[in-house]
Image: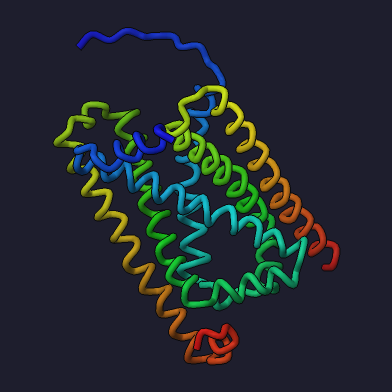
Amino acid sequence: MATREVKISQNYETIAWKWMRYSAILLIPLVFGHVLMQDVLVGVYQMDSAYVAKRLSSWFFQAYDIALLGFAFAHGVNGLRQVLRDFIHNPKVFRVVSIVLFIFWLAITIYGGVALVMATQARLASL
Amino acid sequence: MSNLKNTLVGYATYRGREGHYSFLLHRLTGLGTLLFLTIHIVDMAWFYWAPDMFEEALRLYRSWPFLIGEIALIFAVYFHGINGLRIAIVDMFAPSKWAIAAERNAVRWTLVGSLILWIPSAWMMLSHAVEASKGAAHLLTNLGIF
């Protein structure tokens, strides 16, 4: 079969689509590892503040959790946006929904990100 | 409103068998995981913002309804991950596998792979819960469920 290269100019949607795919590939080891460790091997019955503090005192897990927060939540909110695209056919309405979702994503990411960094800093200061 | 109805009717009546079911399951597991993820980011952030509420959230996660939810959640995560990987690999390296018969086969293997990961995981999570309920009965009575 003959094929030819086609140049497609990058726009916002192309970048968002690529983000979905590349973040997904990274998310498989990140999320599967997180689920196996926290839910399956350790389990919620052994978790308390001391466990979380100990976990966050490790640079490795701090970086791991920041990567999870950054990649997983962006992937999820953009995924929700793609699902809503099936239901909202008016471009103006979809634009408004996209902006609302972006603000929602940013707010939750900052709320979680600040907690993650500050909790670690506080723990390190008390050592 | 007609958009909503048309799309939902399309979702329900399209007759694509395995490809169709995996599309629906991919969306459902994705949305379910996002719902939990949003709650999870907020309650874990309480570790810093509101330590009392953080402890309360952990107590809630130890209840039976949340255990069932957690076991369903990890199926959603496994299926969504493996199915997403299948789509990415076929797209990037083996587009010929989009042929209907090959896709149907791949979808079945995706489900088998998810179950192979999920069944031992679910069993381990259940046994953690049973151990916790034996060792510390107060944990469950505190929740007011028993």
Q: Residue at x 69, y 61 (%)?
A: A56
In this view, B65 is above or below A103: below
Residue positioned 59% across, 53% down in the render: B38
Where does residue A55 sit, x and y in percent of width and height? Answer: 65, 65
Q: Is residue B3 above or below residue B80?
A: above
**The C terminus of chain A: image quadrant:** bottom right
Q: Position of residue B18 (x, y in %)?
A: 21, 43
Q: Is residue A81 visible?
A: yes
Q: Left or right of A4: which side holds B143?
A: right
Residue B70, percent from left and from top: 46, 66
The residue closer to the viewer here, B146 or B97, is B146
The tally of labels here is 0
Judged from this view, the residue extending furthest toward the right is A125
Asked whether residue A21 is in view, the answer is no
Q: Please name the residue shown 46% across and 40% down the image.
A: A24
User: Is residue B53 rendered to the left or right of residue B146?
Assistant: right
* Residue B96 location, quadrant: top left
Q: Is residue A92 above or below residue B40?
A: above
Along the line of sight, the residue nearer the viewer: A19 or A86: A86
